[in-house]
Amino acid sequence: MSRTESVDDLVERFYTVVKLPHDPFAKAFLNRCRSHTVKVNGRFYKYFQSGSGPTVLLVHGLNTNLGSMVAIAEELLAQGYRVVLFDVPPHGEALGTTGDPTEIRALLRALYDRLTGLHAVVCHSMGGLWALTAWHAGAAARTVVSISSPPSTMFLVERFAEMNGLDDDRVRAVVGEIERRFGTTVWDEYSALGAARAIDVPGLVVHGTADDYVPPVHADELHASWPDSTVRLVEGAGHFDIVDSPEVRKIISAHLRSVEETR
């Protein structure tokens, strides 16, 4: 990072997404899916659906794409669920290069409303923060599974500052610019901990003990903030490889079955 980099440039970089194309594994999976679109605020967004049965919406994390959730999707299909995946804008094949939290929230809320028979939302990393903070009273899902979710946007700013060696003055300037763009309530609006306190459905918090990006202590914080939640720590799992863990797939399947049994 250049010491002459402007605050505007720093904030732009904070919200810039690394766009990764779908790999052959993801493409093969999507070839078996039905493609749909949903219109939100005048823009069209694509999502993909496969299977039959209770619907599970899968939300991937930052700097990846829907392909990171395919292993979980395959397990859920085998368990008799319908799965829905999409590229969170501007990831993967979605348009743009810079993530806008208000756009992502609006899209998720539209999907919550669009997907009939929505049974669960399963989200990883930033997908957890996005999915939780997009929750609204009309959401029909019976449960949310949060995997390795960061606690808040402020936590992400602190990580960004640490990784880029920003001093306190620069951090304050970045915080001020984010507030100028999204309002001073941005920290409350995009806090997973704050959102969890208001969610009235059971939650499952899954986290790896070897997560060095979002330390597992934050799983305990999310669990403590979520009135009706359980927490499962996965020994040896890191932040990114956790979504490929067979143990995690079993944990998710067992949780969704338990929620089904309470209907």
Image: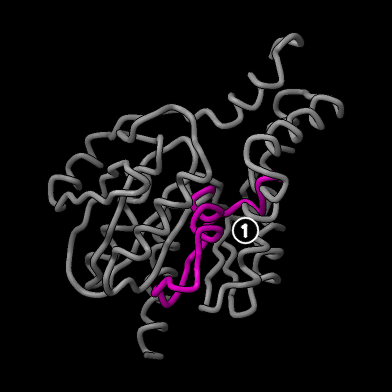
Residue sitting nearer the eye, 70 or 245: 70
Residue 73: x percent and y percent? 29, 58
**Image quadrant of residue 45?**
top left
| Residue visible at 25% across and 42% down in the picture | 26
Render colour scheme: one colour
Q: Which residue is mark 1?
A: 192
Query: Is residue 148 on the magenta stretch?
Result: yes
Say above or below: 72 vs 241. below
| Residue visible at 78% across and 24% down in the picture | 166
Looking at this view, name the residue that lies furthest to the bottom. 262
Say above or below: 61 vs 21. below
Q: Quadrant of the N terminus?
A: top right
Q: Residues in magenta?
A: 126-155
Kind of residue sitting beneath label 1:
Ala
Residue 223: x percent and y percent? 65, 69
Residue 186: x percent and y percent? 66, 48
**Image quadrant of residue 148?**
bottom right
Looking at this view, name the residue that lies furthest to the front. 42
115 on left or right of 186: left
Q: Secondary structure at mark 1?
A: helix
Q: Quadrant of the C terminus?
A: bottom left
Residue sitting nearer the eye, 12 or 63: 12
Residue sitting nearer the eye, 211 or 181: 181
